[in-house]
Amino acid sequence: MKIGFTGTQVGMSEVQKLRLGVELYNLGPEEFHHGDCIGADEEAVKIARELGIKIVMHPPTNESKRAWTYQTGDQVWAAAPYLDRNKEIVRATDRLIAAPKTNKEEIRSGTWSTVRYAWAMGKNVLLLRR
């Protein structure tokens, strides 16, 4: 199973981090795809690495908020604009885990935009509520 991840640049709550660790442990995915941004992506990669999951990065072309989490052995896709790479993460994975900043859906949010795209693609989405 390939898991995609999207989350807020302000980072996850402690509850979201704990739930992510439990979900990844229980699912046992072969790959963890993320967008390599500061905040939740950076925190999520650390959790996935601790569980020994292969990391696949989909970096943004705008490097101003990039986390630079690359380590030897990681797979890195070509950089793409934020919204395009978010769709790429959804298309490349079997399931999406999202850690939004708010529990209520927002229109101008990259995380919620990714969630809506995954729903439209018929993907299973796990929302990690704050």
Image: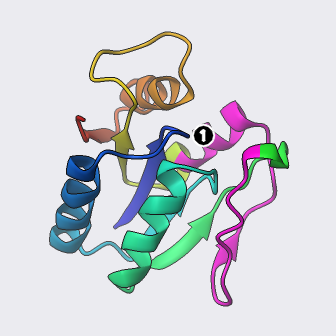
Please rate how many residues cluster around mark 1, counting C-alpha atoms within 10 Å: few if below 14, some from 14 to 19, many from 20: many
The residue nearer to you, when weighing 94 against 62, is 62
Q: Is residue 67 above or below residue 49?
A: above
Residue stretch rendered in magenta on the structure: 65-89
**In screen coordinates, is 90 left or right of 38?**
left
Which residue does the numbered mark 1 point to in the structure image?
A: 86
Q: Which residue is drawn at 46% across and 55% down?
A: 93
Three-letter code, disc 1 = Asn
- Residue 32, quarter of picture: bottom left
- Whether residue 119 is situated above or below residue 18 in the rendered picture: above
Please determine whether, in this image, residue 116 is positioned above or below residue 73.
above
Q: Position of residue 72 (x, y in %)?
A: 68, 89
**Where is residue 120 drawn, in percent x and y?**
42, 24
Rendered view: 102 above or below 29: above
The residue that appears at 36% across and 41% down in the rendered structure is 99
> Horizontally, is 18 left or right of 3 in the view?
left
Question: Can residue 31 be found in the magenta stretch?
Answer: no
Q: Quadrant of the N terminus?
A: bottom left
- Indicate the position of residue 28 as horizontal and vertical percent values: 25, 75
